[in-house]
Image: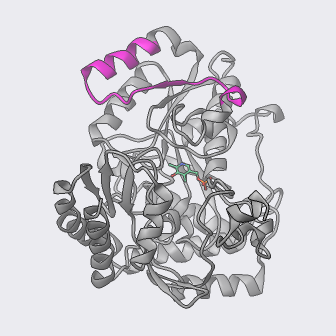
């Protein structure tokens, strides 16, 4: 028997030899060693049905998108109606009612209770990363259109995550394992610590004293840095950033792609602070988790810098599937649900339950921190040695929870039942107690 054969004895063929799976390239996965992905045949509410008949309780709502639970009948009906009428038409030179209605409703939602808020010009795209790219391009071209060519860099923060496209990577945490390989490809931005104390605020001010005339904008995820480590900061940090942006005449971009639509407890995270951004990016929960859609929303002064007789001063961006009509119909239906159903109360209730259910983890071996914000529950560990094994362990408990870095977290659908939420938290307590 050859050495090779004996090595493989008793080992089943790797999953990547299976039909179909042998043709798929999965996200963030070492294809050679990753645990085989689970085939899903259905979703409903906070449940995922697997091809082998098992049912998992979903703890993360498909990367934070499915805020009303899966297959909400109201969104489904709206998408079905739109499908019969017109699934898509290009947005260059053409518009349609679902997009116009959505632009009106989004700006109304963003500006609620604040007459001074003029965040009222919406540019649609098809994913969060692209919405960030558009925000960065808006900021740089804003200055160029005003005759300032030197302001083309962006100030961003350690621990931040803004997406996987090139511009978005350049403003994400440079040490984050996601993007380290691509440093040579990326424009060099100015990435510093969030100004959470006097020293970091002074360091930011000092950086800007030297570089402000090269900088177009500051970008930050308000209140919660999500995929960079689920780190929270206080609303006053946003006020500090607004003051700094004003002092050095920078645009301020809030990336609400994770935090927007109730996740942190308010409709938008920035509404906890007494300041406005100049540009906001939205995606993730925008369509209630049904279809890909994103928006970059600008204040009037940003839009006005593009308002000109010169065609070169137009915003030079236009995704093929921009403002897809099906996705806009889903987003309008999702906003209906925020109006008709008590979503923010549900978030507050989930927040209380997470605090009660996850706080006991603090006493477990290897737990660094437990933190809750809105419908986000985070258990931070010293380290996770085998991420794949931990993920498998949760599946064996009948829950879909997907730790990353040193973080185990829950971001459930806002409509999740008390029993399901308790089962998610039971699983976390039980699995972490085994370590
Ligand atoms: C997920 C995310 C993005 C990227 O969105 P994609 O749709 O995955 O491109 C950008 N910013 C934040 C804050 C995110 O959470």
Instruction: Please state the total of marks drawn on the protein image.
Output: 0
Residue 304 appears anywhere in the view: no
Q: Going by the image, does 303 lie left or right of 312? A: left
Toward the front, the furthest residue is 1
Colour option used: one colour
Reply yes or no: does residue 194 show up in magenta.
yes
Toward the bottom, the furthest residue is 53
Q: Which residues are magenta?
A: 183-208
Residue 387 x/y as whole percent = 47, 56
Q: Going by the image, does 83 lie left or right of 30? A: right
- Identify the residue at horizontal 30%, vertical 58% (top origin): 435
Residue 10 falls in image quadrant? bottom right
* 409 or 394: nearer the viewer: 394
- Identify the residue at horizontal 76%, vertical 59% (top origin): 4
Residue 91 appears anywhere in the view: yes
- Identify the residue at horizontal 59%, vertical 75% (top origin): 38
Residue 179 falls in image quadrant? top right
Q: Tell me if residue 307 comes above or below residue 379 in the rendering.
A: above
Q: Tell me if residue 135 comes above or below residue 329 in the rendering.
A: above
Residue 398 falls in image quadrant? bottom left
Residue 200 x/y as whole percent = 32, 22
Residue 236 x/y as whole percent = 27, 37
> Which corner quadrant holds the N terminus?
bottom right
Reply yes or no: does residue 26 show up in magenta.
no
* 144 or 286: nearer the viewer: 286
Residue 55 x/y as whole percent = 48, 86
Q: Going by the image, does 408 lie left or right of 52? A: left
């Amino acid at each position: 028997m050859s050495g090779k054969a004996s090595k493989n004895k008793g080992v089943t063929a790797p999953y990547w030899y299976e039909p179909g799976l042998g043709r798929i390239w999965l996200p963030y996965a070492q294809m050679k060693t990753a645990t085989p992905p689970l085939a899903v045949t259905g979703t409903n509410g906070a449940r995922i049905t697997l091809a082998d008949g098992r049912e998992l309780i979903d703890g993360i709502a498909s990367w934070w998108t499915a805020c009303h639970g899966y297959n909400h009948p109201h969104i489904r009906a709206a998408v079905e109606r739109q499908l019969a009428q017109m699934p898509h038409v290009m947005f260059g030179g053409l518009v349609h009612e679902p997009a116009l209605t959505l632009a009106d409703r989004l700006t109304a939602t963003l500006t609620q209770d604040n007459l001074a808020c003029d965040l009222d010009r919406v540019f649609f795209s098809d994913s969060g990363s692209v919405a960030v790219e558009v925000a960065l391009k808006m900021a740089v071209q804003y200055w160029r259109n005003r005759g300032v060519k030197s302001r083309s860099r962006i100030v961003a923060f350690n621990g931040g995550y803004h997406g996987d496209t090139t511009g978005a990577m350049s403003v994400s945490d440079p040490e984050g394992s996601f993007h380290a390989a691509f440093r040579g490809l990326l424009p060099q931005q100015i990435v510093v610590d969030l100004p959470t104390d006097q020293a970091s605020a002074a360091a930011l001010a000092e950086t800007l004293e030297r570089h402000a005339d090269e900088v177009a904008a500051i970008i930050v995820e308000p209140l919660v840095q999500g995929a960079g480590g689920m780190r929270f900061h206080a609303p006053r940090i946003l006020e500090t950033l607004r003051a700094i942006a004003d002092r050095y005449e920078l645009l301020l971009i809030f990336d609400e792609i994770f935090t927007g639509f109730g996740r942190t407890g308010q409709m938008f995270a920035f509404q906890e602070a007494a300041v406005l951004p100049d540009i906001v990016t939205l995606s993730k929960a925008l369509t209630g988790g049904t279809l890909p859609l994103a928006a970059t929303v600008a204040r009037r002064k940003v839009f006005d810098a593009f308002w000109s007789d010169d065609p070169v001063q137009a915003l030079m961006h236009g995704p093929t599937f921009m403002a897809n009509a099906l996705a806009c119909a889903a987003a309008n239906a999702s906003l209906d649900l925020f109006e008709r159903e008590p979503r923010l109360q549900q978030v507050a209730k989930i927040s209380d339950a997470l605090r009660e259910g996850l706080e006991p983890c603090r006493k477990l071996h290897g737990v660094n921190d437990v933190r809750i914000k809105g419908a986000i529950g985070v258990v931070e560990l010293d380290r996770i040695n085998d991420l794949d094994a931990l993920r498998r362990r949760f599946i064996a408990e009948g829950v879909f929870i997907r730790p990353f870095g040193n973080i185990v977290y829950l971001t459930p659908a806002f409509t999740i039942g008390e029993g399901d939420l308790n089962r998610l938290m039971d699983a976390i307590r039980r699995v972490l107690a085994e370590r």
